[in-house]
Amino acid sequence: MDALAVPHERGRGWYLSLMAPNTKGKNFAWLDPSRLYCNHQALSDCVKDLLQPFQNESIDLVAGIDAMGFILGSAVATTLGKGFLAIRKAGHLCVQTESQPYSDYSGREKLMEVRLDVLKPGLRVLIVDQWIETGGTMRAAISLVEKLGATVVGVAAVAIENSEGGRWIKENYRCSHCIPEELQAQIDQQHLESFKSFPSPAQ
């Protein structure tokens, strides 16, 4: 049987069971959500769920966060028929940029940047990332967008963990994620019951 097969009944978030557990240890994120992108129906349904809360919002541009936010953000932008802006890790853009320091999910201090020739006052931006764990990366992206005068319409990610940073984002911005209420506790505990369907890593 195809492990990426589409079920006959596609309830909200059905595709979350496609996400793979970490098998490489503590130096990596606790799961790999990108496996769901390998299934076209899963990716399509994920994007549809993310956009549902913004159906009545005017969105001019989608911004995605380096690197996994590029995949989901591009899919969201294409679905909306809008342009896509890459918010990059520092050192990759060959044009003038605005930068913002931040701490990522592992606690490492980093710098992100965005080009200066796109964002401007009045532009309404939806920011997309794959996952929000501690919230540091997303808060830095929000700061960059707002620093250049644009408006953050909302934030979208496959999941937003109820960390201090995740709660702050939920309290201060319109947010969209794909996690049904009954699965949020598993997300916050960083372990999904669906991981049981994956083979144990080789010893």
Image (spheres, rainbow, N blue to C red):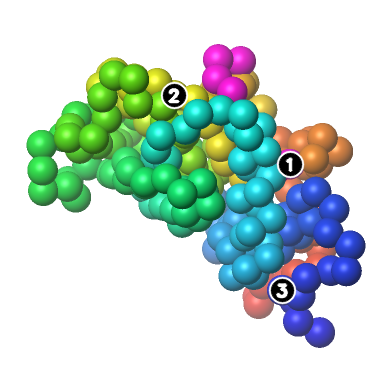
Q: Residues within 10 Å of mark 3 (few under 14, many from 20)?
A: some
Q: Earlier in the sequence, mark 1 or mark 2?
A: 2
Tell me, yes or no, whether the highlighted magenta stretch contains residue 105.
no
Callout 3, which amino acid? Leu
Establish if 183 lies above or below 44: above
Task: Point out which mark residue 152 bears.
Answer: 2
Left/right placement of residue 115 relative to residue 203 reads left
Q: Nearer the viewer, residue 182 or 64?
A: 64
Q: Residue furthest top?
A: 172
Q: Which residue is mark 3?
A: 4
Q: Which residue is mark 1?
A: 179
Q: Nearer the viewer, mark 3 or mark 2?
A: 2
The residues colored magenta run: 171-179
- The local secondary structure at tag 2 comes to strand
CA separation, marks 3 and 2? 34 Å
Determine the image quadrant of residue 139: top left
Residue 90 position in % (x across, y down):
22, 42
Establish if 34 lies above or below 62: below
Q: Earlier in the sequence, mark 1 or mark 3?
A: 3
Q: Nearer the viewer, mark 1 or mark 2?
A: 2
Residue 71 position in % (x across, y down):
46, 56
